[in-house]
Image (cartoon, rainbow, N blue to C red):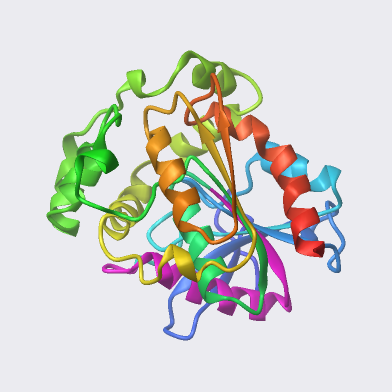
Amino acid sequence: MQRSTRPGDDLRPVRLDDDRTVLVDDTADGTDARSDAPTVVWHHETPHTGAHLEPVRRAASDRGIRLVAVTRPGFGGADPLPGRTVADGARDLAQVLDALGIDSVAVVGGSGGGPHALAAAALLTDRVTAVATFAAPAPFVDDAAWWDGMADDGGLRSARAGREARLAWAETAGFDPAQFTDADWAALDGEWAALGQDAQAAGPTSLQGGADDDVAFVTDWGFALADVRVPALVEQGVDDRVIPLAHGRMLAAGLPDATLHERSGLGHVSVLTALPQAMDWLLRAGRE
């Protein structure tokens, strides 16, 4: 597993059994964490480059956590996998953990990474100790409650017609700033600036990954929330206009052992300010 030699890219390529390559960012490769430290896998938002965001790295480093991230297919330099399900991410993660020699992890996901973190918890039952999600969509149900409150649902609605329709939508779609609250913009101007910078850096390379994420979200995930048997933390901004509050409540209602935090005054990005507390929770839950 040699590191990539592409300019500006120090992520580690890992070749999977089907000859696809995913990219891995692992703080044990540097000086942030011991290789035997408790490990947390961060599942990135949509879109993303796959590289660790500084606030996530800092929260992990402050707690002696080894932080691992796996770039989903179609993002950055990871090979695409058209037709992938949310569950496929767990199968990829299992191979990455084998390659890194890691037996046990806690998992956390922000926004589009949330369903993939839940997949790992549901399907890697002997390896995942706890799971946390931030502003994550709930399994798809085509009714008003699932759609209500989304400021811009064009990507998900086009994905209902399939991958090509979602790719066509992306060619003309623009970003609607109204989907972020004042608290979100403050976070992006401050502590979470790296999130916006990473989304911009992903650029055109994220088009396939974004389409495949959205198609996966509005089709069968490949597992049920009831299959998540480890402790689950659901972090949800009350004012979220991207993934509304109802989704956090749906997740908490469907997970067998869930703690729901409804964060007043916070939106889709600003809810991530609770990540340090979530890291503490993951460490405690993993020991219980």
Residue drawn where x is 54% and y is 61% of the image? 256
Q: Is residue 71 visible?
A: no
Front residue of 262 and 219 = 262
Q: Residue furthest bottom?
A: 17
**Taking 146 as reference, is 26 above or below it?**
below
Magenta segment: does it hold 62? no
- Disc count in the image? 0
**Taking 214 as reference, is 275 above or below it?**
above
The x and y percentages for residue 131 are 62, 57
Q: Is residue 57 left or right of residue 117?
A: right
Front residue of 194 and 204 = 194
The x and y percentages for residue 36 are 86, 68
Quadrant where the image shows the N terminus: bottom right
Q: Quadrant of residue 27?
A: bottom right
Residue drawn where x is 41% and y is 67% of the image? 224
Quadrant where the image shows the C terminus: bottom right
Q: Is residue 244 left or right of residue 121?
A: left
Q: Is residue 201 visible?
A: yes
The x and y percentages for residue 126 are 65, 79
Front residue of 118 and 262 = 262
Residue drawn where x is 60% and y is 76% of the image? 125
The x and y percentages for residue 282 are 73, 53
Residue drawn where x is 37% and y is 59% of the image? 74
Q: Which residues are magenta?
A: 81-109
Q: Quadrant of residue 284?
A: bottom right
Magenta segment: does it hold 90? yes
